[in-house]
Amino acid sequence: MDEYSNKFYKKQLETVQKNLVANGFKNTVIFEDTNSMVDYVTSLIGTGKKIGIGGSQSVRLSGLLENLKSKGNEIITHTHDMNVQTRRNVWLAAQQADFYLASPQAVTFDGELIFLDAYGNRVSAIIFGPSKVLLICGRNKLVKDIETGIWRSRNIAAVKNNIRLGRENPCVKTGKCENCNSQQRICNILVVLHKKPAFTEYEIMLVNQELGY
Ligand code: SF4
């Protein structure tokens, strides 16, 4: 991306940062690129910690997990071959981790964070449970308001995730959300963090690059 676009997005990220801080998310930091974010989070977490994570592509594509594992941290996450009971146990353990890593599907200019979940394990963890929740948000997630954020969650993030997961939902065929009744539907639970929940600690990383879906 050219330098003028980077400056443009930096201004937008600064607006979002200011409003996230006003909404109680005091620890909100802007990074020029993904690598500097990865270095920061790796240093913040340190060694020997338990780290929960859902299916965040922002986290997985950034290379952060490999860094954290190399520092002797334990990653608590599901794999596709796990049965329901095993997944349930993993997700409950992730909710009691030292850190939980996730990425919202959208963040508004007013500093609201939007999450759309299939099963609820991720939105449970980002609301209450882990000692600290770390939220990573690429500039592609910025939206003007909650309505646009919900649209983005369903028509961009969810469609891409359906393709990634090999789900045979109608959005995969049309490239847009069809508000399906499919058994494999992944858009079941909507959570908006309007303000910081009092008993959960957050650190929010805004990245001036496209990251995840
Ligand atoms: S509601 Fe259904 S059609 Fe819409 S994005 Fe989700 S899975 Fe796809």
Image (spheres, rainbow, N blue to C red):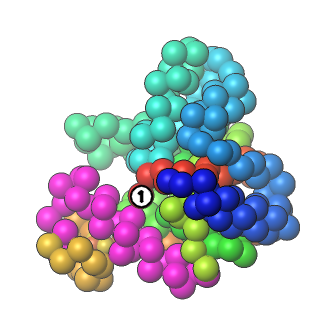
Nearer the observer, 184 or 159: 159
Residue 182's place in the image compared with 199, above or below, is below
- Residue 107 in view (yes/no): yes
Magenta span: helix, strand or loop, mainly? helix
> Which residue is rendered at x = 85% and y = 67% of the image?
22
Image location of residue 210, percent across then percent down:
49, 54
> Which residue is rendered at x = 61% and y = 81% of the image?
145
Based on the picture, tell me whether residue 171 belongs to the magenta stretch. yes
Image location of residue 157, percent across then percent down:
39, 64
> Which residue is rendered at x = 72% and y = 30% of the image?
44
Q: Please state the extent of the stretch shown in magenta in the rendering.
A: 145-172
Image location of residue 190, percent across then percent down:
50, 72
Residue 19's place in the image compared with 206, above or below, is below
Location of ligand 1 given as a quarter of the image: bottom left
- Residue 90 in view (yes/no): no
In-image side of 63 versus 167 (left or right) = right
Mark 1 — residue? 213
Secondary structure category for the residue under label 1: loop
